[in-house]
Image (tube, rainbow, N blue to C red):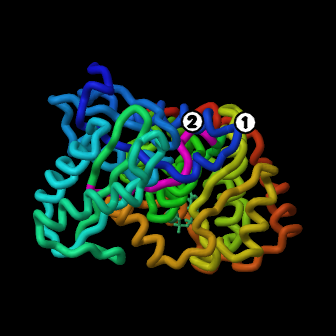
Amino acid sequence: MTENMNSDRFILIHYHEIGLKGKNRGRFERRLMTNINRALKGLPRGNVRRLSGRMMLALTSDSPTEMICERLATVFGIANFSEAIGVDREIEAIRETAWALAQKADFASFKIVTKRGDKTFPLNSEQINRDVGRHIQTLSGARVQMDAPDLTCFIEIAPQRIFVYAEKIPAPGGLPVGSSERAVSLISSGIDSPVASYKLMKRGVTLTYVHFHSQPYTNRNSQRNTEDLVRLLNRHQFASDLYLVPFVEIQRSIMTHAPASYRVILYRRAMLRIAEAIAKKVDAKALVTGENVGQVASQTLSNLRAIEDVTTLPILRPLAGDNKEEIIREARRIGTYDISIEPYEDCCSVFVPKHPETHANLEKVRAIESELDLAPLIKQTLTQTERKTFKL
Ligand code: ATP
Ligand code: MG
């Protein structure tokens, strides 16, 4: 690793939200730094340093810049980042570097935006803007334009170094994974639950995944697709556990003993009981589902209530109010959509009734369930549950 300050190629990393965390700020920044290092594992580069409200990654001559940028764009907590040139503390050097960057762009209008974090620099931001602006204007013939110019050249005056860059690459923002405790995410191989998982990770939550399958009644596709989804989502978390729960015995028992219209609600209640047991084991503080109000019969408010009756953990449903096309757009953007639409037989689609209850009565649900004696089956299912670990 090279010493940062001697290098002149950097990635400057900006974050918004963790800057607002008051006395927790140091903890959030350390977590973000750890996550950046994990995301960049194996790639040649200098180290990451904190630098008053931002982070700086020194690049080395063998750094694969494109790949580094690709990986940084997946790290929650980063708002945006830029490839920046480090220059000496002289206005001539700033001018020359700004012009060198500008020459790479095709532009008819531009502006200079200077942030002076180091007030000891002899020129103030306005003076730097004017000086560098004039230089570029003279050499390029382009006009200065404040509102939506073709090119924006950013200059940041930090105590240690001055950075010049022309492009901000957007990143997902949010909070670094690991800063908001753990939740258990119920993940199917469908479209919704991977998006729900992504949204909670973006809020800093560490996830443990649980998937219910009906083998040998269904083929292995749902399990394989789910594993592919977890592998993809693990880009953001670096290490994830997936619990694979054999659900057939419980389904069989519910199918044989409960009225058809209540089956789905009873399956879901059993799923939540198992998820809660796993949550207890891994010290998770909440459950996550991809449920969405009104999308399918089990997702009326009455039914959601009848389902969540079995757990005292908060159930986070980040998609509750989204429209299907919004969820699909998000799934496409985060890369889960193509895996989710691969053909599979869901554990529940195989065993769903034609006319499910849409307004379940909670007392009735409890009464039906109490006839079933599911507790021993749930216990047995937990012992047959397999855990798979995914590492980046
Ligand atoms: P998804 O697109 O996530 O499959 P969905 O629209 O198919 O959701 P449901 O089948 O009612 O809706 O499932 C609601 C939620 O219950 C899912 O988002 C997921 O969190 C959980 N869930 C459903 N099936 C499974 C499963 N086989 N394993 C784990 N969780 C599941
Ligand atoms: Mg589904």
Q: Position of residue 183 (x, y in %)?
A: 64, 44
Asked if residue 304 can be seen in this view, the reply is yes
Badge 2: how crowded within 10 Å, few (<14), some, or many (20+)? some
Q: Is residue 297 magenta?
A: no
Residue 350's tag is none
**Of 300 and 43, which appears nearest the observer?**
43
Residue 112 quadrant: bottom left
**Of 96 and 317, which appears nearest the observer?**
96
Q: Is residue 201 left or right of residue 165?
A: right
Q: Which residues are magenta?
A: 166-179
Q: Is residue 16 left or right of residue 135?
A: right
Q: Residue at the location (31% across, 21% down)? A: 3
Q: Is residue 285 left or right of residue 18?
A: right
Residue 385's tag is 2
Pair 1/2: label in front:
1
Q: Report the Cα–Cα distance between label 1 and label 2.
A: 15 Å
Say which amino acid is labelled 2: Thr
Label 1 within 8 A of ligand 1 by Cβ: no
Q: Are marks 1 and 2 in contact (CB under 8 Å)?
A: no
Q: Main secondary structure of the magenta part?
A: loop
Residue at the extreme front of the image, as rendered: 122
Q: Residue at the location (51% across, 33% down)? A: 387
Say which amino acid is labelled 1: Lys
Q: Is residue 171 magenta?
A: yes
Q: Is residue 240 left or right of residue 22?
A: left
Location of residue 133 with respect to 323 vertically, above or below: above
Residue 392 quadrant: top left
**Of 103 and 224, which appears nearest the observer?**
103
Residue 280's tag is 1
